[in-house]
Amino acid sequence: MKGDQNVKEGAIVGAPATRKQASGAAAEALAERFLARRGLVVLAHNVRCRGGEIDLVCLDQGVVVFVEVRLRTNPRFGGAAASITLAKQRRIVLAARWWLAGAGRRHAGRPCRFDAALLADLDEDGVEWLKAAFDADGS
């Protein structure tokens, strides 16, 4: 399944989605609508490579935007933003580089940005959009 962009690693083909997978997919669809209403054009969904993944790849006025969508309904362990650890950022950057070198190579010369769409529930009015949430160097 190397480079397969449509199969979750470890998922059983044909098996129904778990509740967590279904709510994650709903959050990603909600974030996509939210961003599209603000003028972003979605270029790719669920980009996966060995060691990394990106929920959404968008274009925002000539800037390639890699978006991490986080749904955290229970703030006990920190909110959605707290769940984007340095290790998670590195996996997103790895996948972004992989995408720019492959499927997204026509966009490789454009500036890039790493955003986050944070949700406490599945309500578009509650989406918190963090532009430039982190940099490729982990800052």
Image (cartoon, rainbow, N blue to C red):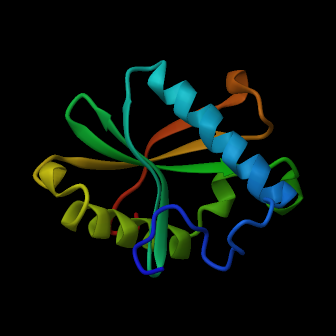
Estimate the x, y position of residue 107 in percent, counting from the top left: 17, 49
Residue at screen point 88% across, 52% down: 74
Nearer to the camera, 48 or 109:
48
Seen in the picture, residue 56 relative to 61 is either above or below; the reply is below
Taking the image as shown, residue 100 lies to the left or right of residue 8, namely left
The residue that appears at 86% across and 55% down in the rendered structure is 19
- Where residue 25 appears, x then y in whole percent? 68, 48
Q: Nearer the viewer, residue 125 or 77?
A: 125
Compared with 96, 28 (above or below) is above
Query: Residue 127: percent from the left, percent from the top?
Result: 65, 31
Q: Is residue 18 left or right of residue 98?
A: right
Q: Nearer the viewer, residue 124 or 118?
A: 124
For residue 16, which quarter of the picture?
bottom right
Q: Give the image quarter of residue 105.
A: bottom left
Total tally of numbered discs in the picture:
0
Q: Is residue 94 above or below residue 83?
A: below
Mark yes or no: residue 67 visible.
yes
The answer to whether residue 79 shows anywhere in this view is no
In the image, what residue occupies the spot 76% across and 27% down? Answer: 123
